[in-house]
Structure formats: structure tokens, C-alpha cells
Image (cartoon, rainbow, N blue to C red):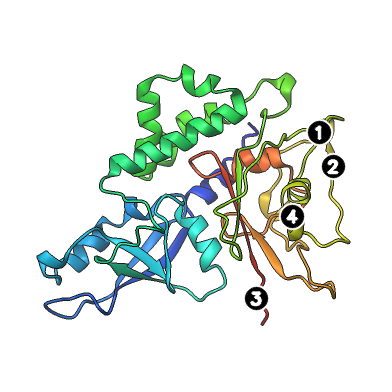
Amino acid sequence: MTDDKDVLRDVWFGRIPTCFTLYQDEITEREAEPYYLLLPRISYLTLVTDKVKKHFQKVMRQEEVNEIWFEYEGTPLKWHYPIGLLFDLHASNTALPWSITVHFKNFPEKDLLHCHSKDVIEAHFMACIKEADALKHKSQVINEMQKKDHKQLWMGLQNDKFEQFWAINRKLMEYPPEDSGFRYIPFRIYQATTERPFIQKLFRPIASGGQLHTLGDLLKDVCPSAITPEEFCFSIRVEDFTLPWPISAHYILPPVFGGDKNGEKTTQVMIHGIEPMLETPLQWLSEHMSYPDNFLHISIIPRPTD
């Protein structure tokens, strides 16, 4: 992979200021004060909220404490989605801190998976990494790793250790020079305005003619409603692909996405809280903007009207 460590660090250390409040109908022995926390975008709610749980359990009657779950403005928050994805999908255009409601009763069975221990989170995380490597390398890289390497990936995420995680994850981001990229790009596209969980399909980073596929190419093929009819997609020849490029100079600029009949922009496409330009090569995005599970999680959300 191209060595652009500053970008990897910026992604890893992204934080969301969050205010947790106890649901008003929970039975408490005294008033429950809000709890404030900087949530790491790349982690999972049930992995980083032990302090939140302990804080509210202090004022709860023990017989009223069941499995904890979280909700934002009436929407149960899926713990198996990365925190940054949850925020981009549900709250990216709201004021900070992010206001999350904590529940200990009435678990929404139809909306959420149970998470009784961190072993469940680890199993989900490793399953995603294995799926991603099946797409990128036919599972060859992950299968050649030792069990201690798998554990190091997990412990790096759990303990928020950038160097520990990337010492192993770097191997998952490499490819033979003659291939110019992965076999397929691991991605999932989420739409805030649909009940469908996400869109996922096989998509190569390199076109048959040797051009690098871009974010615009992916959206045009998989989710054309996210792009205005007037928009075109960009191709970059592999021989012209000379990263690293400064991410702030090239990709963090407002693109033009899906519009209404008057040509007004109505949607935003978000990855890690930013709007990458449509010209961004997918291979570069996959190497630098994937979550620790090795997937690009792309949110398509309504653009604010004000």
C-alpha cells in the first residue's frame, strides 16, 4: 500500500463528543446525571461504553438492570456497525455533542442483535476481516497469518493501539505489484432513507482497460441515485497513479451528488465524516479510509436544506 501514515492516523484517532442520558422511564433510586465521552469512530458502542454502563447502574435498582442498548432520536443503534458509521448515517448534520439515550429495558429484538460479551464483538469483527480478505486476496493473507496475529488485530482495536493494529493490518492492505490493486473492493453502502440494511456487490478497483475505478464509478454502478444525471465519472490511468497525495489538498472537497429535478444537490456521500471527491481512486480509499474491519462503509444521507 502507499505509505500515507498521517491519513491512517487521522482516521484512527477520529473522535465524536457524545452525551449519554438515561431514558426517562427507567426506574432509578436517584437522579441520573448525563455522562460525556469522546467516542472513537473506528470502534463499536458495546466495546467502549463500559464506563457509561457502570455510571448509570449506580443509580438503578439492580432488579431493573437488563441488557444495555442505545438509541438516537427513536432509532436503536446497531452495536455491530462502527460508531463513525452510525454517526454519519443518523446524526452527521446535528449539533455536537451527539445525544445518545441509554436503555436497560425493553430490548428491541427486531432491530438489534444481542451482545452479551466482548467475545461476540470479537467474533463479528474477525468475521468481517475474513470476508474482506476473501474479496481482496481470496483469503490467502488472513489464512497465512497465525492465531496470535488475529489476536493482535483484535487487541489493537480493543485497546485503541494504532501501531499494534497496523503492524498486522498492513499485510491485509498489500497486493502484488503486477496486480495494481485488490481483486475486489470490500465496501458497503448505507442509505438513510431506505429500510435496506446496505448494498454490497463485487466491484474491481481496476477497469478492464487498466484505468483505476473511482468513487464516482462505484456510485454510478451500484447506487446511481446518489449522482446527478449531469455528473460524469473520472478514470485515472494506473501509470499516473502516484500517491501518496496530501488528503487535505485533494479529496476533502465538496463533490456534487444526487440532485432533484431542478438540479439541486439533495444527498451527501460520507466516509469517516467527510465527503470524498468523486475522482478519488477506490483502491486508495480502500487502503486508507477503510474501518478496522477492512470494509469501506459509505453513507448516503439527505443534504441539509438550511
Q: Nearer the viewer, mark 1 or mark 4?
A: 1
Residue type at numbered disc 3: Pro
Tell me how far mark 2 sits from mark 1, CA to CA.
9 Å
Above or below 49: residue 127: above
Above or below 187: residue 30: below
* Residue at numbered disc 3: 304
Viewer-closest of 11 and 186: 186
Quarter containing the N terminus = top right
Q: Which mark is residue 207?
A: 1
Local SS, label 4: loop
Say which label, 1 or 3, has the lower sequence index.
1
Residue type at numbered disc 2: Ser
* Residue at numbered disc 2: 235
Marks 3 & 4, CB-CB < 8 Å contact? no
In the displayed structure image, the side of residue 284 where residue 99 appears, left or right? left
Local SS, label 2: loop
Residue type at numbered disc 1: Ala
Tell me how far mark 4 sits from mark 2, CA to CA.
13 Å
* Residue 45 image offset from top left, x and y in percent: 37, 55
Tell me how far mark 2 sits from mark 3, CA to CA.
30 Å
Say which label, 2 or 3, has the lower sequence index.
2
In the displayed structure image, the side of residue 222 where residue 44 appears, left or right? left
Marks 2 & 1, CB-CB < 8 Å contact? yes
